[in-house]
Image (tube, helix red, strand yellow):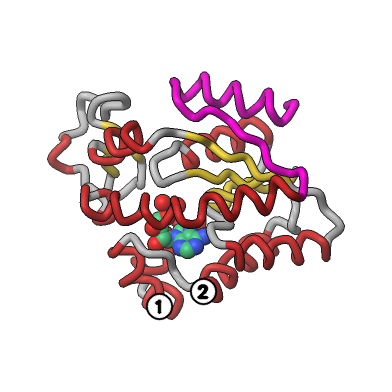
Amino acid sequence: MRIALFGAPGSGKGTQAAILQDRYSLRQLSTGNMLRAARDAGTRVGLAAKSYLEAGKLVPDDVVCGIAYDALSKCGFDNFVLDGFPRTIAQAEWLDLEMEGVGGGFRLVSLNVPHDAIIARLSKRRMHPVTGEVFHLEFNPPPEDLDTADLIQRKDDRPATIEQRLRIYDIQNATIRDHYADQGSLIEVDGVGSVQTVAGRIAASLSL
Ligand code: AMP
């Protein structure tokens, strides 16, 4: 199975991709996580991506396609759920070519969540600096023994940066969806609701 989850930052892509990974033995390939890991490790790719990541801007296509290629190769271009890729039409066209090369069908699941709900979600999102676990101060609070003061807010989850990321998403959104709708591989899912409700909708839409 070859899936990409597409949605605004904070639409729940990462959470839902992790569920698909666990339930259906797919490999979650999150370009955001890969780029952050590369930045933290100070690799060449990480250094190229750093300023874009922190400003909430899209990392150049050649850099992102490079890390996507490495990740897809490791899982034999099958049984994956891409999380946060493709995000531009150039990335979508690159992925189409790679998928054609392996003769594989591919579906894009678009998670639809209104902006006001996203801003509420992201501004209270916190991450554990060591484990990478993600919490929401209101909807998914950390366990009692974890001091919230130890959690960090991603630089790109600050309000001004969230707005910038949503603006970028809006620009790409229509183009990417049209591209996959024309191919007949777009699946639209309502992303508002509990994690389990949305997971159920995704599974139903993919006939899992
Ligand atoms: P995410 O964790 O998916 O919200 O991604 C966090 C950040 O990583 C984005 O704001 C971009 O700076 C960068 N990024 C992740 N995926 C991509 C992509 N497919 N194309 C360009 N930049 C990306």
Query: What's the residue type where badge 2 is placed?
Result: Val
Q: Is residue 127 left or right of residue 25?
A: left
- Of the 4 image quadrants, the one containing the N terminus is top right
Please tell me which residue lies in front, 49 or 24.
Answer: 49
Q: Looking at the rendering, which quadrant does residue 45 occupy?
A: bottom left
Up-down relation of residue 114 to residue 101 (above or below): above
Q: Would you say the residues marked 2 and 1 are in contact, meaning their CB atoms lie under 8 Å apart?
A: yes
What x and y, as percent, mark residue 160? 21, 53
Up-down relation of residue 73 to residue 3 (above or below): below
Up-down relation of residue 157 to residue 198 (above or below): below
What x and y, as percent, mark residue 168? 40, 57
The numbered mark, 2 or 1, whose residue comes first in the sequence reads 1
- Helix, strand or loop at label 1? It is helix
Label 2 near ligand 1 (CB < 8 Å): yes
Residue at 70% x, 64% y is 73
What x and y, as percent, mark residue 154? 27, 51
Please give the range of residues in magenta.
183-208
Residue at 53% x, 71% y is 61
- Helix, strand or loop at label 2? It is helix
Please tell me which residue lies in front, 141 or 41.
Answer: 141
- The crowd level at tag 1 (other Cα within 10 Å; few <14, some 14-19, many 20+) is some
Residue 201 forms part of the magenta stretch? yes
The residue tagged 2 is 63
Query: What's the residue type where badge 1 is placed?
Result: Ala
The residue tagged 1 is 48
Q: Is residue 135 visible?
A: no
Marks counted in the figure total 2
Q: Residue furthest right?
A: 103
Q: Residue furthest bottom?
A: 44
Residue at 27% x, 49% y is 157
Residue at 36% x, 41% y is 133
- The crowd level at tag 2 (other Cα within 10 Å; few <14, some 14-19, many 20+) is some
